[in-house]
Amino acid sequence: MAALFLSAVPPSQAAPIHIAPPRIFHRTIRAATPQLGAPGLLPAGPDQPARPWVEGVTPPLENRLFDATYKTLPSHNVLKVYVFDTKAYESAGIRFSARVPHEARDLGRSEMSHEAVSLIRTTFDEFPELQTLDVWATIPVPKSELTQVENTVFSVSADRDTYLSIRDKQLSDQEFLEAFGRVWVAPEIPQ
Amino acid sequence: MKLLLVLLSALIASSAAVAPVRMPGKMLPELPPAGALPAPPASSVDADESAAYGPYGEVWHVRTERKEIALTFDDGPYPFYTPVLLHILDHSRVPATFFIVGRSAQAFPELVTRIVESGNEVGNHTFNHFTLTSLRDDQIAYQIAADGALLQQFTGRPLSLFRPPHGRFNRHVVAIARELGYHTIFWSAAADDVKDIPPELITARVLSEANPGGIILLHSGQYRTIEALPDIIDGLREQGYSFVTVSKLMEDGEGPEQSLGR
């Protein structure tokens, strides 16, 4: 019986498996600062309310960005915002839902494009310190495909210089987004 | 007995199941049917011959007298994180090697373009980031080939570097990658930065493990890694290191082609 089992195992699984080691365990290095949990993962408390809409990289800025952007979308479908403040180069990200809350449908390409344009305009107009902004839309992944939590169906990477060069031009949403480079729209998304 | 065999077969089949890959058909490379791949060749590398190469011909470190070192970033590209990472590398004039996951590259093509246009090297990190040692040979080949076909559209030429997800490998993984034209690249130093550790600790680990010909493992989607990166760059430069891509490191090293048995 054991022989039968072994013969049925794919060769790649029968071969010895190696796990590449981090190669740092032979010495102890003390951190200069105490180890902390990621700010966004800290347990909620009286002074630290749960804020699932921020990534926790720069919570104050992220809160401000969320406040400014979630209300610009008709269905308030901003899921999470991210801001990195390096004091020299500030970058942000906004993830929004392509699945319309309380409706049994997903946003189409033109709707997602319109929402992305709104988010880009709002962000660069109200946050002059931000240099780049990535905007992407996700839909939940069915439990039968448990390879990731969310499935990205739309993305665009925007930068301030390009934005300033097109801000006052009369462009369609599609033209506006294309000015930033490649825009990703999943093939299954309806036009 | 028959029932037991059926249950056993079902168990084995379910353990090897893979979620379907979502890619436009035209991007998918033609792959050989299951079982059509040649048997993994026996390694021609003597494990004792060199500290730089593993028993299956995988690369851990490049032997060189030059004080060159390669920063490598696994996973992604990630929105929000990758632009900051690229800004720091560009600003510091440091080339790096990005091992990119296909499904992320597909979803964020502009970020891959920026990685390539900034002069960084791109390596294959499979299409779905599955643990390859759990897959059949044909599935392993598919994961590597699909990612390579996608990324080649950005680089304009075939990729030559591959790193298995989660650092899990066996002789099949390395041999299949080699059959597809890849060097399998690991690392000589890692900061274990996927765990939530302070940037100071990430920096300290990298600086203490640095050596000529070293390959440093870092991850793209960790903001503490990004916070640590300027200090890592400054610290390595103070130690006299210059930064190169993995391919350049191997090019400057001592005969990787021969050591890989190609």
Image (tube, coloured by chain):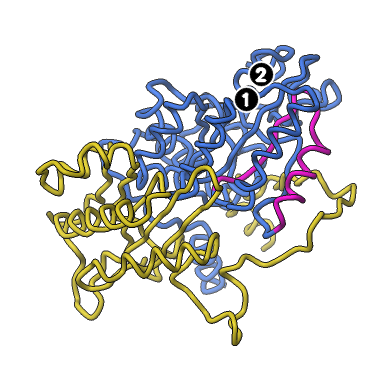
Chain colours: A yellow, B blue
Picture layout, residue A10 above or below residue B73: below
Q: Quadrant of the C terminus of chain A?
A: bottom left
Q: Is residue B138 visible?
A: no
Q: Chain of mark 2?
A: B
Q: Quadrant of the N terminus of chain A?
A: bottom right
Question: Is B128 one of the magenta-colored residues?
Answer: no
Q: Which residues are magenta?
A: B197-220
Q: Residues within 10 Å of mark 2 (few under 14, many from 20)?
A: many
Identified by mark 1, the residue type is Val
**Residue at (75, 46) in percent of width and height:** A22
Question: Is B201 one of the magenta-colored residues?
Answer: yes
- Left or right: A88 as drawn, with respect to B70: left
The numbered mark at residue B250 is 2
Tell me the distance, in whole angstroms, between the alpha carbons under discs 2 and 1: 6 Å
Identified by mark 2, the residue type is Met
Picture layout, residue A47 above or below residue B84: below
Residue under label 1:
B246
Q: Position of residue B103 (x, y in %)?
A: 40, 47
